[in-house]
């Protein structure tokens, strides 16, 4: 187990390094992406632009520029090219809305996805299974931004049950925070619930025909115990793997459309603004932050799968 974690952490460092290098190089090759010109202003004289380029090291080689940028990131002194502000301060202000959105929506799509998938699998071919299938396909087919905009229009403007966007810190007012986050949670969850429920249903129906399930039934083990201890336990591992990656991607700014519709001003909107301004330092920070969470989520998911399935544990030793 310890050796496995060490190997995965080493691979995680390599992935983060590769992602940061690729992101840096992509924005260095974009036409009209001169950071010195953006920092000095379009109307600045060539002398001023050259002075800025020399001051920030933009006239040095790409490896040196990359090393200087990474040093600034890890020391917390990285500065935005376009806004001339500390990127870490902006990250700190953008994190709470994104984390609130990711945690709430992640819990919703995991709980309801597993619940609906379990019901559909145990009632395969019946009315409830068909109803859940229809709901899941509808949820998967609807674009997230359309769901978000529709919910906001009807339940915030037409029928003002919920606030019309914005974010209230949890520490400031828990009740108001909850009301502000309900619609974003539902909007972000509806697609994932459809996917998770269909995936779990398919996995459970496949597991029900496995030899170890038939053996358990032949030994006289109760139906409910077979269902939950053998079928569900072995079927839910792909769900955990998918959930951990989806959750990490959401924290890394993957819910940009939801944040935009509901004016949450989280990491997704921060990333979109940085891309529009070709602002490399914030994007490097966001990409490394996102890749860190995705890789760590993969490691945690593998460990959970090893604990749930002894066969994986045997293969890894």
Image (cartoon, rainbow, N blue to C red):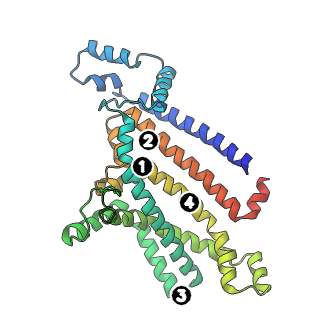
Q: CB under 8 Å between callouts 1 and 2?
A: yes
Which residue is drawn at the image coordinates 36% and 28% (left, top)? Answer: 31
Mark toward the start of the polypeptide (3 vs 2): 3
First reached walking from the N terminus: tag 1 or tag 3 = 3
Q: x, y (%) of residue 81?
A: 34, 29
Q: Nearest to the eye among marks 2 and 4: give it.
A: 2
Q: Secondary structure at mark 2?
A: helix
Which label is found at residue 253? 1
Mark drawn on residue 126: 3
Which corner quadrant of the image does residue 270 belong to? top left
| Mark 3 to mark 2 CA distance (whole Å) | 46 Å
Label 1 crowd bin: few (<14), some (14–19), many (20+), radius 10 Å: many
Query: CA gap, disc 1 to disc 3?
Result: 39 Å
In the rendered image of this protein, does residue 225 appear above or below residue 147?
below
What residue is disc 4 on? 242
Instruction: For label 4, count other residues whose C-alpha is less than 10 Å away and answer few (under 14), some (14-19) or many (20+).
Output: some
- First-in-chain label (1 vs 2): 1
Task: Tell me the residue at 68%/47% (across/down).
Answer: 5
Is residue 174 visible from the viewing direction of this image? yes
The residue indicated by pointer 2 is 286
Work out whether mark 2 precedes mark 4 in sequence or the reverse, and give the earlier one: 4
On the image, the x and y values in percent for residue 190 come to: 42, 67
Q: Secondary structure at mark 3?
A: loop
Disc 2 to disc 4, how far (Cα)? 21 Å
Question: Residue extending furthest top?
Answer: 47
The 10 Å Cα crowd at callout 3, few under 14, some 14 to 19, many 20 or more, is few
The quadrant holding residue 102 is bottom left
**Depth order, front residue of 68/256:** 68
């Amino acid at each position: 187990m310890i050796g496995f974690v060490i190997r995965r952490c080493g691979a995680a460092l390599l992935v983060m390094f590769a992602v940061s290098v690729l992101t840096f190089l992509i924005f260095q090759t974009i036409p009209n992406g001169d950071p010195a010109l953006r920092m000095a202003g379009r109307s600045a004289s060539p002398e001023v632009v050259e002075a800025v380029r020399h001051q920030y090291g933009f006239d040095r080689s790409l490896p040196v520029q990359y090393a200087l940028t990474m040093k600034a990131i890890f020391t917390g002194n990285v500065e935005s090219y376009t806004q001339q502000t500390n990127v870490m301060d902006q990250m700190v202000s953008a994190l709470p809305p994104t984390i609130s959105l990711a945690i709430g929506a992640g819990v919703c799509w995991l709980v309801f996805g597993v619940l609906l998938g379990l019901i559909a699998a145990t009632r395969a071919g019946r009315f409830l299974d068909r109803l859940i299938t229809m709901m899941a396909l509808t949820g998967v087919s609807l674009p997230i931004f359309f769901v978000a905009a529709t919910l906001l229009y009807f339940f915030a403007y037409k029928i003002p049950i919920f606030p019309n966007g914005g974010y209230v810190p949890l520490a400031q007012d828990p009740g108001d925070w909850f009301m502000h986050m309900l619609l974003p949670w539902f909007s972000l969850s509806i697609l994932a619930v459809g996917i998770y429920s269909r995936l779990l249903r398919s996995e459970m129906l496949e597991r029900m025909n496995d030899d170890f399930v038939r053996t358990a039934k032949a030994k006289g083990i109760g139906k409910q115990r077979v269902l939950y201890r053998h079928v569900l336990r072995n079927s839910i591992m792909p769900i955990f793997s998918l959930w951990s990656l989806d959750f990490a991607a959401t924290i890394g700014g993957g819910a940009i459309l939801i944040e935009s519709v509901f004016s949450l001003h989280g990491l997704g909107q921060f990333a979109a603004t940085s891309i529009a301004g070709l602002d490399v330092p914030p994007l490097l920070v966001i990409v490394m932050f996102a890749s860190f969470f995705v890789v760590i989520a993969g490691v945690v998911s593998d460990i959970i799968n090893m604990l749930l399935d002894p066969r994986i544990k045997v293969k890894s030793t």
